[in-house]
Image (cartoon, rainbow, N blue to C red):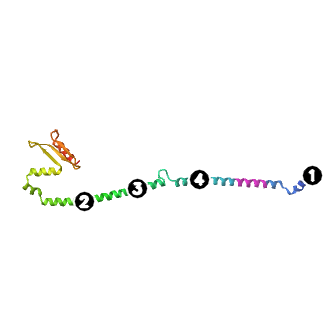
């Protein structure tokens, strides 16, 4: 332990080396330097904080721009949509191919029919047969060939018609029901085409 008198003596010995004005100025300079350093550190901290906020905004904007918007389908939905469109394209290509094949066969059929029409224009079988057959008999044969077979009553009137449909069914049309000629005609063709 140090004696009080000894401590007092030591302080007195140090008095010549201590200058209170200089010490005061040193303390004031140190405080100013600490204040300036603290202000500089506070300014740097505020700048760093502002920079951090700006970087946070940039990060958030980058995060938003890097995520897929809700209006854009997911990758799986996009792949499924592509697969569906590929399937649709293939089925449409097949339908087009089938239609082109059908068109080619119809073109061939049309050419054959045009050739037949040209041949028939040159040769008129009706004129040749008219010389040999009665016109009524020929018309009756044509009607039967189409599928119409008139039923002639004893008085020579046709009151009913048997209609052979394309399906093989036989229908009877009675001409005494009071319909117009147009309605009978439509009914006959409806039955023959069924």
Q: Along the line of sight, which residue is nearer the eye, 103 or 178?
A: 178
Left or right position of 175 against 60: left
Mark 4 vs mark 2, foreground winner is: 2
Image mark for residue 107:
2
- The picture quadrant where one finds residue 156 is top left
Mark 1 vs mark 2, foreground winner is: 2
Q: Give x and y (percent) for residue 133.
A: 8, 54
CA neighbours of label 1 inside 10 A, class few (<14), some (14 to 19), many (20+): few
**Residue linked to disc 3:** 85
The residue sitting at 15% across, 61% down in the picture is: 119
**Disc 3 element:** helix
Q: Give x and y (percent) for residue 74.
A: 48, 53
Image mark for residue 123:
none
Left or right position of 35 against 55: right
In magenta, the rendered stretch is: 26-38
Of all residues, the one furthest to the top in this rendering is 178
Image mark for residue 56:
4
The residue sitting at 40% across, 56% down in the picture is: 87
The residue sitting at 73% across, 54% down in the picture is: 34
> How far separated are the C-alphas under marks 4 and 2?
72 Å
Q: Quick one: label 3 or label 2, which is nearer the N terminus?
A: 3
């Amino acid at each position: 332990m140090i004696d009080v008198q000894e401590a007092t003596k030591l302080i007195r010995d140090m008095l010549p080396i201590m200058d209170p004005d200089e010490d005061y100025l040193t303390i004031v300079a140190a405080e100013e330097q600490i204040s300036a350093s603290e202000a500089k550190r506070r300014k740097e901290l505020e700048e760093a904080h502002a920079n951090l906020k700006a970087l946070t905004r940039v990060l958030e904007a980058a995060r938003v721009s890097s995520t897929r918007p809700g209006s854009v389908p997911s990758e799986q939905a996009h792949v499924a949509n592509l697969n569906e469109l590929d399937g649709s394209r293939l089925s449409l290509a097949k339908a087009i191919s089938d239609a082109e094949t059908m068109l080619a066969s119809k073109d061939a059929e049309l050419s054959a029919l045009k050739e037949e029409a040209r041949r028939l224009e040159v040769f008129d079988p009706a004129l040749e047969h008219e010389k040999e057959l009665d016109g009524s008999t020929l018309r009756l044969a044509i009607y039967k060939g189409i599928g119409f077979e008139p039923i002639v009553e004893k008085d020579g009137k046709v009151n009913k018609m048997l209609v052979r449909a394309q399906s093989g069914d036989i229908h009877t049309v009675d001409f005494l029901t009071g319909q117009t000629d147009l309605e009978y005609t439509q009914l006959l063709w409806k039955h023959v085409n069924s």
